[in-house]
Amino acid sequence: MLKKLILIQVLLSFLLFFITAAGQAQIRTLTVSVDGLSCSFCAYGLEKKLKKMEGVEAIKIGLQEGMVTLSVKKGRSINISRVRVAIKDAGFTPRKMKITATGIIKINEQQQFLLQLSGQEQEFLIVDLKKAATERLLSLAKSGATLEVEGVIHEKPDGLWTLSPESVKEVTE
């Protein structure tokens, strides 16, 4: 009986940790420059396509800027590759992509920094760092702190995503 109680307590602790981490670590917004957005009808067609995507809470389309911003539901995730495909399927060309995401910094075997988002298979290789930023990220990786990172992302031919951070701040909740 005691073993069952301990097992239940361990499972509940793990579940609570997983739910909390999944709610904190995610892509919060994705902004994409889109070529070909020239009229309200274009925007409507694109919005209709993107609304079908799992995890999307809101869509904002700026015709003049040619920008689409997706807000992600709290505790949910979106697949960036699928967003690109949806934009192409709607007849447009996705260009520069920028995210705001929360996660933790990990260091891989090649001593490179990765932004790891829990609840997702996707990781972002952090690139274009200055020395001061490298030292700060090393400290944050060691502490295991949750961070909010904003920056430009690129997909490499091998399917790896890179992130050029524009801002990094520690999340205190």
Image: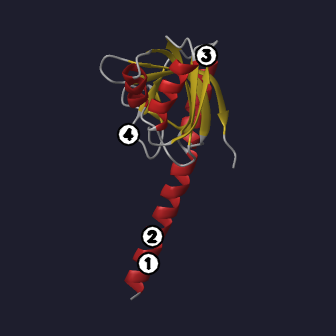
Distance of mark 2 from mark 4, alpha carbons? 24 Å
Q: Specify the amino acid type for callout 4.
A: Glu
Residue 66, x across and y down, in percent: 58, 14
Task: Locate residue 6 relative to residue 41 in the image: left or right.
Answer: left
**From the viewer's perspective, is the residue at label 3 or at label 1 nearer?**
3
Asked which secondary structure carries label 3, the reply is loop
Dot 2, how many residues are within 10 Å of its Cα: few (below 14), some (14-19), or many (20+)? few
Q: Specify the amino acid type for callout 2.
A: Val
Q: Specify the amino acid type for callout 3.
A: Leu
Q: Which residue is mark 1?
A: 6
- Answer above or below: position of 148 versus 154: below
Distance of mark 1 from mark 4, alpha carbons? 30 Å
Residue 169, x across and y down, in percent: 67, 33
Distance of mark 3 from mark 4, alpha carbons? 32 Å
Q: Which residue is mark 4?
A: 121
Q: From the viewer's side, name the closer residue of 74 and 128.
A: 74
Dot 1, how many residues are within 10 Å of its Cα: few (below 14), some (14-19), or many (20+)? few
Task: Locate residue 100 relative to residue 42 in the image: left or right.
Answer: right
Which image quarter is the N terminus in? bottom left
Distance of mark 2 from mark 3, alpha carbons? 51 Å
Tell which residue pokes out farthest to the left in this image. 158
